[in-house]
Amino acid sequence: MNLLITGGSGLIGAKLVEQLKGDNQITVLTRHPQLAEEKLGTGLTFITELAALNNLDEFDGVINLAGEPIVNKRWSAEQKALLENSRWDITRQLGELFAASDSPPSVLVSGSAIGFYGRQDSQIIDESFDKPNIEFSHELCATWETLALEIETDKTRVCVLRTGIVLAKHGGALAKMELPFKLGLGGPIGNGKHYMSWIHIDDMVRGIVHLIQHSDCSGVYNFTAPNPMTNIDFSNALASALHRPCILCTPKFALKLAMGEMADLLIYGQRVIPKRLQENAFTFNFTTIEDAFADLY
């Protein structure tokens, strides 16, 4: 297949390129082609802007993962606008390119996050859940998803990835979580009862490939492992994997003080399950947090 990937040098994108590049032609949208080639290797085509394309007729599929990392900086008004525009603008541009194509790609896989659901309690949430808590993470994802789903036609199917916490050996959320544990200062947040919905990076990438390869797949998919964990159980498992104690807790107010509104991503959670992926015969290699940490550490 001839594939266009936005966000190809990010955590998920880089692993996806590694998985796909042997058997496919890949074009990566990146602001820094030289750095991207150093990270992703040779044999790829790099473009710096979608304006370099008149249409998408040459591509069989598009994977849209571009977006400013959501936990990089405090959510000032300026940072919120950057988070929005880095996702929405590229998706709008892709929509225009799909519309300008005589023979558009047959599939668009586009990113989102379980932040779409907003903060929730312990209720089990699958893709049919329709009572999101209206907050910034929901509004960010809802518009992003709408822009992607509007691209769907009888020639192009669209799959949206509502992604949980992606666990990888290097980078991502786990790199930020593990430092206090390595120092012996790790523990749950608050009472630790809120749920964390996670996915191993290998299952994340395999799931995307599954959607690309199965022409009957379209719509929204939760990209989370089948067994979400409470924060205290997640913390205990991480401490055990690192052979460190799990005795301290981080008060909610301290996170609020340090991170502002962005702390809500850590203080509140969702108990999300990947119902539609499993219904489509996708098999997870890492179904428990213990399995995931055993592989990663």
Image (spheres, helix red, strand yellow):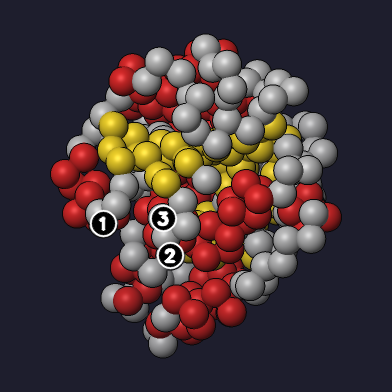
Query: What residue type is disc 3 on?
Result: Lys
Q: CA distance from mark 3 to mark 1?
A: 10 Å
Query: What residue type is disc 2 on?
Result: Ala
**Label 3 close to label 1 by CB (< 8 Å):** yes
Q: CA distance from mark 2 to mark 3?
A: 20 Å
Q: Earlier in the sequence, mark 2 or mark 3?
A: 3
Tell me the quarter of the picture where residue 79 sits.
Answer: top left
Per the image, the residue denoted by label 2 is: 168
Left/right placement of residue 192 relative to residue 20 reads right
**Considering the numbered disc 3 on the image, is that residue within a helix, a strand or a loop?**
loop
Per the image, the residue denoted by label 1 is: 41
**Label 2 close to label 1 by CB (< 8 Å):** no
Q: Position of residue 13 (x, y in %)?
A: 42, 49
Q: Earlier in the sequence, mark 2 or mark 1?
A: 1
User: Relative to 236, does residue 157 appear above or below in the rendering?
Assistant: above
Query: What residue type is disc 1 on?
Result: Gly
Q: Position of residue 175 (x, y in %)?
A: 35, 63
Q: Position of residue 210 (x, y in %)?
A: 65, 54
Is the residue marked by circle 1 packed among few (<14), some (14-19), or many (20+) residues within 10 Å?
Answer: few
Per the image, the residue denoted by label 3 is: 21
User: Relative to 217, does residue 42 appear above or below in the rendering?
Assistant: below
Left/right placement of residue 237 relative to residue 261 reads right
Q: CA distance from mark 2 to mark 1?
A: 20 Å
Q: Is residue 191 visible?
A: no
